[in-house]
Image (cartoon, helix red, strand yellow):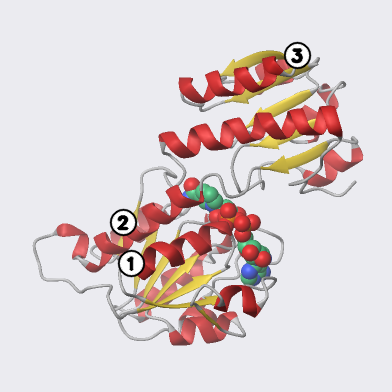
Amino acid sequence: MKVLVATEKPFAKVAVDGIRKEIEAAGYELALLEKYTDKAQLLEAVKDANAIIIRSDIIDAEVLDAAKELKIVVRAGAGYDNVDLDAATAHGVCVMNTPGQNSNAVAELALGLLVYAVRNFYNGTSGTELMGKKLGIHAYGNVGRNVARVAKGFGMEIYAYDAFCPKEVIEKDGVKAVGSAEELYKTCNIVSLHIPATAETKNSINYALLKDMPKGAILLNTARKEVINEDELIKLMEDRPDFKYITDIMPAANAKFAELFAGRYFSTPKKMGAQTAEANINAGIAAAAQIVGFLKDGCEKFRVNKK
Ligand code: NAD
């Protein structure tokens, strides 16, 4: 069996070493395609691969057509909107992600960005504190739960809304579960986004939802840029000079945000939430272990596409 690691932005060496150890211990061969610059290189490399580990790499129908021996693709990370799930199902390929492996990294970054925002981007002026403020967690998944855990240490009052997670699961963590996204945004000074980018969530963070946030509101996005309706967020920030937008995922209209909203808009230069040595290693090794479990025992835990 041949396992290909196809990463335009490579894993750290220590992660590749860990992946190799897992794969070779199972008696499989590891192939590496790192820092490729052209899709043709990926199409060539996948030809004889039985399994592929990727990061933000795009796996579309063309790649799946070229990968005649492929059984499984694992996205080392949480979001898997870079894989064409329907095409994978049509090709009989299992797609998995590695949930939870980078959640602490994203949560720490989220709170770091919040401190930066409430202290006016460290510009020397007096800011505010997070203690006692109402933090809304929009989606109580792996990252959302870690954000709640870290925010508790800051003394924040924490609320959450998740369309699928039962209220009891949220409340057992000492977090107040609310019944709708609208209620969350109305209630909280700060909302931290942790929804995945799906057909339902794309463009769903819009003017109507944000307009009722309390004065001095902050929207924090470490999820995906696609969930934001950028035109409506720009309109809202024009109408509300008290509103701040802080993100780890640069908007398509970054230049416009930066020009119009200096002092109340910040984006990391590139997505950095999961960029820690620990998350890199954890997600890569988990991906390798999931491939071995699937190929040896047919384990499909963490499968994200239909059969
Ligand atoms: P997760 O799958 O553990 O949690 C997602 C949660 O969203 C689930 O609890 C689910 O019930 C909920 N949900 C789905 N659709 C919803 C909807 N319409 N309304 C409300 N809740 C909904 O994922 P995670 O590990 O917590 O990651 C969350 C997202 O963060 C990922 O999808 C990814 O896009 C993003 N992410 C970004 C970085 C980064 O580097 N900034 C790193 C990891 C994850």
Q: Earlier in the sequence, mark 1 or mark 3?
A: 3
Q: From the Cβ of disc 1, is ligand 1 less than 8 Å away?
A: no
Tell me if residue 152 can be seen. yes
Residue topped by disc 1: 153
Location of residue 172 (image quadrant)? bottom right
Position in image of residue 133 (x %, y %): 32, 79
Cα separation, mark 3 vs mark 2, equals: 42 Å
Q: Quadrant of residue 132?
A: bottom left
Q: Amino acid at mark 2?
A: Gly
Q: Residues within 10 Å of mark 1 (few under 14, many from 20)?
A: few
The residue sitting at 47% across, 20% down in the picture is 13
Which mark, residue 27?
3
Q: Is residue 40 visible?
A: no
Task: Name the amino acid, label 1.
Answer: Gly
The residue depicted at 28 percent of the width and 72 percent of the height is 130
Q: Is mark 3 within 8 Å of ligand 1?
A: no
Residue 95, horizontal then vertical, whole percent = 77, 40
Crowding around mark 3 (Cα neighbors within 10 Å: few <14, some 14 to 19, many 20+) is: few
Percent across and percent down for residue 154 are: 30, 69
CB of mark 2 within 8 Å of CB of mark 1?
A: no
> Mark 3 belongs to which amino acid?
Gly
In what element is the residue under mark 3? Answer: loop
* Quadrant location of the N terminus in the rendered image: top right
Q: Secondary structure at mark 2?
A: helix
Q: Secondary structure at mark 1?
A: helix
Say if 171 sits above or below 6 in the image. Answer: below
Q: Nearer the viewer, residue 53 or 100?
A: 100
Asked if 37 appears above or below 130 in the picture, the reply is above
- Tag 2: Cα neighbours inside 10 Å, few (<14), some, or many (≥20)? few
Rendered image: mark on residue 112: 2
